[in-house]
Amino acid sequence: MKKINLIFISLILAISSTIAIAGDWSKIRIGTEGAYEPWNFTDSAGNIVGAEIDLANDLCKRMNAECTFVQQDWDGIIPALTQGKYDVIMAGMSVTDERKKTISFSKAYMTEPARFFTLNSSPLSTFSSAKNLNLDDDGSATVGTISSLNNALKGAKLGVTVATIHEDFANSYLDTDLKIYPTQDEMNLDLAAGRIDAMLCDVGTAEAFMGTAGGANVVTFGPNVFGGPLGEGVGAGIRQSDADLKVMFDKAIADASADGTITKISMQWFGKDLAP
Amino acid sequence: MRFELMYESFFKILKGVPLTLEVVFISTLLGFGLAIIIALMRISDNKLYSVPAYSFIYLIRGTPLLLQLYFVYYGISQFSFVRESFLWPILREPFWCGIITLTISTGAYSAEIIRGGIQSVSQGYIESGKALGLGRISLFFRIVMPITIRQALPAYGNELILMVKASSLISIVTLMEITGIARTIISKTYAPVEIFLVAGSIYLFINFIITRLVKYAENRLSIPGA
């Protein structure tokens, strides 16, 4: 009986600890992956740093909240939010209709197209195509670009990270041998080693890799890909029940965008302006 | 609990069973051969054999399997001379990296199991064999090995089960076996409890079959009435 009581009490505590904080947002826990340079990553000293960390600290100041960061693997990052391990996801996560079924999002704070990357020794590096591929437009130009991409990628091994907009896009538009990685870091290593022929990811994170010695031979090819399953830009993931927190984030993001803070952070980490 | 999701996922995850079994089967087979060689080196009186064997076992048993897999897959491929060597077509493939890692691991653990079995063969049997005029090789295969297998089988059955479970680690090097498929489904459905229950049950069933087979072999090999 004692044991049952104990279980019961700890259950109540577990439930109430997630309820009690609703409405009181003086402390906000932010979940991030820490393996997606330069959005969020772990430096050699083991600290989580990156554009989103700087942005989160700025947003929290605007909301008069004290923010802490929680590191969470990407493939469990949404369940951990719904289970209350943290209150917000800021992890280079694109706002998509698919994810909106489970969580809600703030307005986008940064936006960036996806691109393909390969080694400069690969025949893919000379592939040329239209500059942009907008998946919201289903005209003949879009269809033509996709079919020329598929021709170039025939039989090639294409890397994507698990449960990303890029995996969704590759699954629904591309006909190629897909290799699915848990993190960007592991995919980078395999591209450099030649285990995969190409990878598809956000431009910024690939450029961060290209700036290191290991990624010196990496080049980009193909069009800028955006729209459709690639979503509306990167936003903060918030539990659907925390509508008040979403309002706070929307306002803080709008302010940070208006006074140039997002542009400043973006220039510092990406070398270009990703402000929405 | 989303039972419909569990039902759908069951058939998706089932598609990973052949790869799991294939990896376990190949690496267990290769690992068993490796283990016999290592075990014989380990009990040798010649230090030239026993010291390398002991070091190998010590190194492999003392480090995490996950780390060994990372080392084989991501570590070795960092060197360009490896990527240019004749070994690269093998080391390039995640499948063979998984096989190599698991073979080395089970080789080390099984070597200790086999060594225990060999050393349990009583001196009396060996002397009787010698008295019958058996040479070193036939003494080993006809007297020592059969007794060793009988002695070591329960412990080796345990190792087989550990191998099935260890094979789940290869999902981190892009191989879509049971755990790999389960993780992919979870990252889309956000239902870890349901999917892990399904994946866990499949492992449980595989291991149930293995324990039955080992038990059957134990019964067949046991001395009647002993």
Image: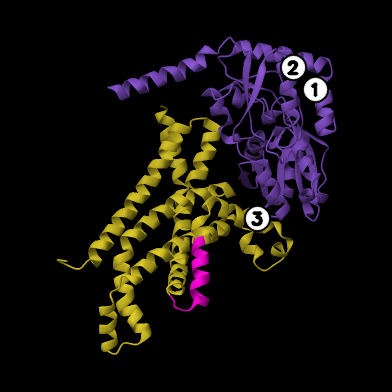
Chain colours: A purple, B yellow
The amino acid beneath tag 1 is Ile
Mark 2 lies on residue: A253
Q: Which of marks 1 and 2 is nearer the N terminus?
A: 2
**Foreground residue, B159 or B20?**
B159
Q: Is residue B28 left or right of residue A241?
A: left
Q: Distance between the residues labelled 3 and 2?
A: 41 Å
Label 1: chain letter:
A
- Image: magenta residue range: B44-58
The amino acid beneath tag 3 is Gly
Residue B60 at x, y = what percent? Answer: 51, 59
**Foreground residue, A227 or B68?**
B68
Mark 3 lies on residue: B75
The amino acid beneath tag 2 is Ile
- Badge 2 marks a residue whose secondary structure is helix
Label 3: chain letter:
B
| Residue in the picture at 75% in, 42% down | A116
Outermost residue toward the bottom in this view: B133
Mark 1 lies on residue: A262
- Give the quadrant of the N terminus of chain B: top left
Q: Mark 2: few, some, or many residues within 10 Å (few <14, many ≥20)?
A: many
**Foreground residue, A156 or A181?**
A181
Is there CB contact under 8 Å for labels 1 and 2? yes
Q: Mark 1: few, some, or many residues within 10 Å (few <14, many ≥20)?
A: many
| Residue in the picture at 44% in, 45% down | B14
Is there CB contact under 8 Å for labels 3 and 1? no
Q: How far apart are marks 3 and 1 (CA)?
A: 38 Å
- Give the quadrant of the C terminus of chain B: bottom left
- Badge 3 marks a residue whose secondary structure is helix
Q: Mark 3: few, some, or many residues within 10 Å (few <14, many ≥20)?
A: few
Q: Is residue A34 left or right of residue B196?
A: right
Asked if both marks, 3 and 1, belong to the same chain, the answer given is no
